[in-house]
Image: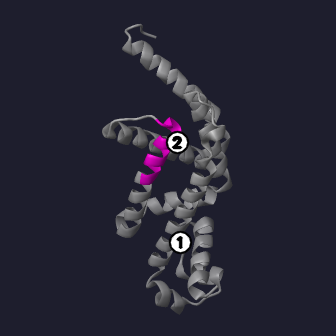
Amino acid sequence: MGHREDLLAGARRCLYEKGYARTTARDIVEASGANLASIGYHYGTKEALLNAAIMEAAEEWAQELKRALADVGDLPADPIARFERTWTRVIELFARHRPVWAAQFDAITQLDHVPEVRKFFSEAQQAAQENLVALLLGDARLPEQTETAVGQFYHALLSGVMMQWMVDPEHAPTGEALAEALRTVGEYVGRAGSGQGV
């Protein structure tokens, strides 16, 4: 690899080990084997290099998630069982890539200061919402506004589940627990909507 690639790899290593806000230019130099001047030459600033590193890591994770969930042939036809199996896969993948998520959450706290990272995460978020709807609802045809709302709901669930796994993996939800919760809420809402009470 050249200095540019070495710096990017070193910056990613630092993101995973130290986080976005705590990584210094000297940390990246030490991790990459490059020199301070090469950061300015190839990326302009340390922040630009870290931004490139976090975007590369997020994109790789998104592609791996997409590949892991691409084979829908073995997913059950029952919507709740499909939901459970899918979220079990998502959680298993997260457990293997926890540092990537930690770095992303750290970078998100800096969005007010780095517009290019905000733009990247905004676009990635919209794509994730669309993909989650397609995966979890299969061939369902929804009005555009409803599909957007469902995508936002699934993405909120994804972010919340990942945050719980980061904070306390021992008590974080499993795919089975999420499916049980969905089934219970659906039954409650159904009874309330029909006037039957709880």
Can residue 136 be seen by looking at this rendering?
yes
Please give the label number shown on residue 135. 2
Q: Which residues are magenta?
A: 127-139
Type of amino acid at the residue the image marks with label 1: Ala
Report the magenta stretch's main SS.
helix
Q: Residue at x 45, y 43 (%)?
A: 156
Real-space CA distance between mark 1 and mark 2, rounded to the nearest whole angstrom: 28 Å
Q: Which residue is mark 1?
A: 53
Please provide percent x and percent y for residue 150.
41, 38
Q: Looking at the rendering, which quadrant does residue 175 occupy?
A: top right
Please provide percent x and percent y for residue 138.
51, 37
Q: Residue at x 43, y 19 (%)?
A: 189
Please give the label number shown on residue 31. none
Can residue 172 be seen by looking at this rendering?
no
Q: Is residue 182 left or right of residue 124?
A: right
- For disc 1, the neighbor class at 10 Å (few under 14, some 14 to 19, many from 20) is many
Please provide percent x and percent y for residue 171.
64, 38
Q: Secondary structure at mark 1?
A: helix
